[in-house]
Image (cartoon, rainbow, N blue to C red):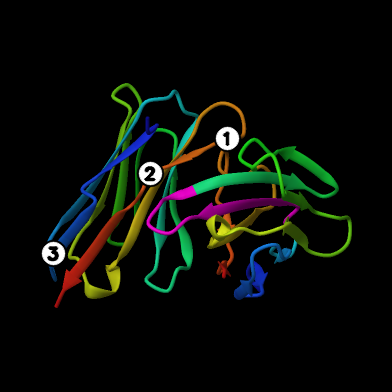
Amino acid sequence: KNEVEQSPQNLTAQEGEFITINCSYSVGISALHWLQQHPGGGIVSLFMLSSGKKKHGRLIATINIQEKHSSLHITASHPRDSAVYICAVIPTGNQFYFGTGTSLTVIP
Amino acid sequence: NAGVMQNPRHLVRRRGQEARLRCSPMKGHSHVYWYRQLPEEGLKFMVYLQKENIIDESGMPKERFSAEFPKEGPSILRIQQVVRGDSAAYFCASSPRQGFRQETQYFGPGTRLLVL
């Protein structure tokens, strides 16, 4: 049983397209993070959300606590956005759960 | 301002040997987290440490694995008597206070462990 489900698992887009990655979770949470893992393996934290919406450049993250769902949007996608995007949720306590990631490839 | 440092970046061990993975958090950070990413699998939490204290080790295998974060020096993840199934990427992250619940964690580049 996975506490965090992401979709799609793999996504290929043309440069300039609007991209949406979804994350659904089954536990009550205090916060949710979106991470980006580059092809070389390095991990960067993109957003931490506990409610509403956040925007950073071309990236937008939203969360609906009642529906236990979050989305990550990328506007005007670019080949450098190609990476694995990982959703992580933080229930009460210190344990946290990761989705298996969405592998995004943006084609020029 | 150096980020989170991990060394070695790549480590090869034979079955039965010990692996020691080091993590130096960002300057001013006193909280360290270790994660494991098995091939073709997602990240898994292993352990959360503060200086000289293990706060949560619920993700650590019960045997052969241990972690410490001494008052001075880096955090160490130690794997004794490695087996092939330990081959994975091990990531460390740090935060100034309790991360993930309240703030961003900063990840190191990872150590890729290969057990022959």
Alpha carbon separation for disc pair 1 and 3: 34 Å
Quadrant that contains the C terminus of chain A: bottom left
Chain at numbered mark 2 = A
Q: Position of residue A96 (x, y in %)?
A: 52, 37
**Furthest-bottom residue in view?**
A108
Which residue is under mark 1?
A95
The mark that comes first in sequence, 3 or 2, is 3
Numbered label attached to residue B3: none
Q: Is residue B1 visible?
A: no
Say what secondary structure mark 3 lies in.
Answer: strand
- Residue A13 is one of the magenta-drawn residues: no
In percent of the image, x 27 and y 61: which residue is there?
A: A58
The mark that comes first in sequence, 1 or 3, is 3
In the image, the segment drawn in magenta is B29-43
Seen in the picture, residue B110 relative to A28 is either above or below; the reply is below
Q: Is residue B105 visible?
A: yes
